[in-house]
Each structure stands twice: as C-alpha cells, then as structure tokens.
Amino acid sequence: MGDPQKSDNIYVGLWVKGEFVPAGIIAYNKSTGISGFKYLEGYDGPPIDPINLNYQKSGSRIFRVDPRFNQQMLHRVFQDQLPGAWGMSVLMAEHPELKTMSAAERLSWFGTRTVGGMNCRVFGEDKLEHPNSGMARLTEIRAKSVDLFHKKIATIIDKRAWWGLCSHGGARPKTSFVDEDGQHWLVKFNVDFDGYNGARIEHALAVMAKVAGIPSVETKVVTLLDGEEVLFVKRFDRSPGLINHQPAEVRQHQISLFSLLNEAKFQSQDQSDYTDLIQVVRQASSSPDEDSEQLFTQMLYNIGVNNTDDHAKNFSMLLTDDGYRLSPMYDVTPNTDPYPHAASLCGLARADLSESMVQFFAKKMGIEQQIAMEIRANVVAALGQWVEIAHSCGVSESDIALVQKRMYGQSNLIGRSSKAGPT
C-alpha cells in the first residue's frame, strides 16, 4: 500500500471509450496544507467533475482545494472514491492510524483505488478492486460483518474481504460481489436490531419505484447457506457489455450530487434542499429536462414511502457516452418514524403529496405544473399498489403493515388535496 509520507502525488485515470485513460494528478503537501488537481496537458476527455473541475469551461487545468472549506486536501469527487462509514469502520478496527489521516492521505494509503469508472493510484501501484465471490464466502462475510456492526470486534473480518467490504459508501454492512456470470452486485445485509426484513422491503420499494416510472436499480433477495436473506443490488457503474463489438466489462464514472454542490455553502451532506439538487442536475446533465423530472419524481416517491435518508450522497450522476446523466434511484428505505428529510423539501422538513403541495414543489423547482401533476398521479398510483407489490416480493404481513403505516399515516395525505398549501 502507498505511504503518504513518501508520495504526495496520486495519479487519476478515467474510463473513456472502453479503457482507463490517464486524466490528471492529485497533489497534496501535508506540511503546507496545499493541495489540488491538475489535468494532464494531453487529456481531452470529459471533465471528472462537470461543475467544479470543468477544464473545458474554466480555461484552466489546475484546480486548488480551498482549505477554508475543505480540510481534507482532496476534492470531493475524489473523496467519493473512499469507503463510507461502514467500510472505514472495518479498516480502522485493524488500522487505527487511519483515524487521524486526511482524505488525501487515506486515498494514498490504499496505493490503488478503483471504483466504477475512476482509478486512483500512487506511482508503481496498478491494481483493480477485487469483489468477493462464492456463496460460502458471502455467507461467512455476512455473519462476520453483522458481528462487527454489533461491535463484536473480536471477530474482525480477515484481510481477504477488505476490497469488497470497503468498496462502497454508506453506514450499513455490505460488500461487493461478482456472480458466476461476471455480473457485479452490491450485497446488503440485514441487521438484527432493525426488527424487520430490510432486504425484502428495499427490494419491494425498488420494484414499486419502477411502477412509478422511476429508473431504479435492479434488485433481488438471495438466501445464503445459513438461511439468512440478503439484498443483491446490481451495480450500474460496472456491467457486462460490448467494447468494439466484443464482450467486455463496461464501467461508468459516478459522482454524487454532494460532490457537485458548492463546498463553500454545503459542508455536510445533510445541508442541501431539493432546489439545490435540481440546480446541480440541470448544470451537470446532458439532458437537463429529463433528469430534472426524474429527480422531481424521486422526491415525491421519497415523501410517499417516508425515505428520509435522501441526503445529497444518495443521488449521483453517471458519465455516459452522451455525457453526465442522473443515475438510477438507489438506497430507498422507509423510516418507521416521522423524521425530517435529510434534503429539505423546498424549505420544508416534511410534506405530503396533496395537489397543492406538489404544485408548490413544481413552482419552486421549475417543473411545469401539468408535468408535475402527471408525475404525482403516477407516484400515487404506484403507492396504491404497495400491498400487492410487497406480497409479490415476499414481504411479511407485519413488515407490509409497518411500511404502510408510514405511507398512509400521520403526515402523508396520499391521493387527497389539502385545503391550502405553502405559498
């Protein structure tokens, strides 16, 4: 692994037209606190960050990190490459020195780090990530992961599992996995103290999102060798495909909407509003109208199913052959309590799906009223099929009622018009 004391350069490659292309260099100096990113002179591909690191529009290939707003010595698009809270907890249990490192030092510590369509490496390191494989291995990893999640540190997962366990963000136990067909998945584990089968609920919500007209991740529930159920989420940044008419793995660079937000204004992933998110989507997307309507639909759906974990890192843009596009919807889980949404709803902490409320949202977010009402109708119709869809996905009666209570209770006025909405 790389030693940040010996190297202050990290070399970045971006997946362009079927291969990783050298794009630029991350440079940081721990003693001075100066850091930034420079595109290579010969690089003429798409910008790694279409808003904050766009050399095509800025006229400059050098982008410094502003230490007033970012003390990690690393632009946020590169911080997206690091493990989330769960992955870092796995690593820190074995490597406590990581706790005091900046994000730049952690990325350098890996030596090489490849997530989807971006590769970051220190000089001399050139390896790709290694997802876990095999049902026996996955069964073992699930058991040890849940133990670790429950703070049973004595059963630390062995080093062979690190690459998969630390491949993605988020605070819940999960691992990357490749099946016998070469398809890549993110596997999410149930946690005992939840009190419900999160795998089946999230699977049903992903299916229902498609009914609402939302591009959503492909999911399935798999029973492991020990009888435990886990959720398989197909990765949209890696998939079998064709390159030059030949079967090959296709990769896509992914950047969270949090990374696209202005660092000076947004220091936390929970600070944004949907009006902020739709603004960056319009700036970054090659099809801004279509992607804005998708984001609007996702907001209404999150309200309807009480998914309050809708912070800016749970939305992403994907680099496609046609430019950056809003990714499929992912990480949709209902909150069993009436908590505020992580992303404010046009200034509101909570809301309903009444006609007047949706009209208010449309006005604030720049969506045509007729289109907004059509979107609302589709979402409400999908929510009305919850029981049927949940049954088809194997959700238990008690879990169906648990989700339905929040969908149809307290603050969500599904299918009804409130007498007066916000102005």
Image (cartoon, rainbow, N blue to C red):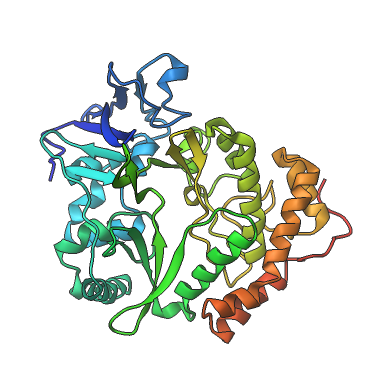
Q: Residue at x 63, y 55 (%)?
A: 213
* Position in image of residue 80 (x %, y %): 37, 44
Q: Nearer the viewer, residue 91 or 46?
A: 46
In which quarter of the view is residue 369 placed? Answer: top right
Asked if residue 30 shows in the view, the reply is no
Does 242 sit left or right of 9 as displayed? right
Q: Residue at x 24, y 58 (%)?
A: 131
Q: Residue at x 45, y 28 (%)?
A: 52
Q: Nearer the viewer, residue 351 or 66?
A: 351
In which quarter of the view is residue 164 placed? Answer: bottom left
* Position in image of residue 321 (x %, y %): 43, 34
Asked if residue 325 shows in the view, the reply is yes
Does 421 sit left or right of 328 as displayed? right
Q: Quadrant of the C terminus?
A: top right
Residue furthest top as drawn: 59
In which quarter of the view is residue 135 placed? Answer: bottom left
* Position in image of residue 114 (x %, y %): 26, 44
Does 283 sit left or right of 145 as displayed? right
Count of marks overlaid on the render? 0
Q: Nearer the viewer, residue 85 or 15?
A: 15
Does 104 sit left or right of 207 as displayed? left
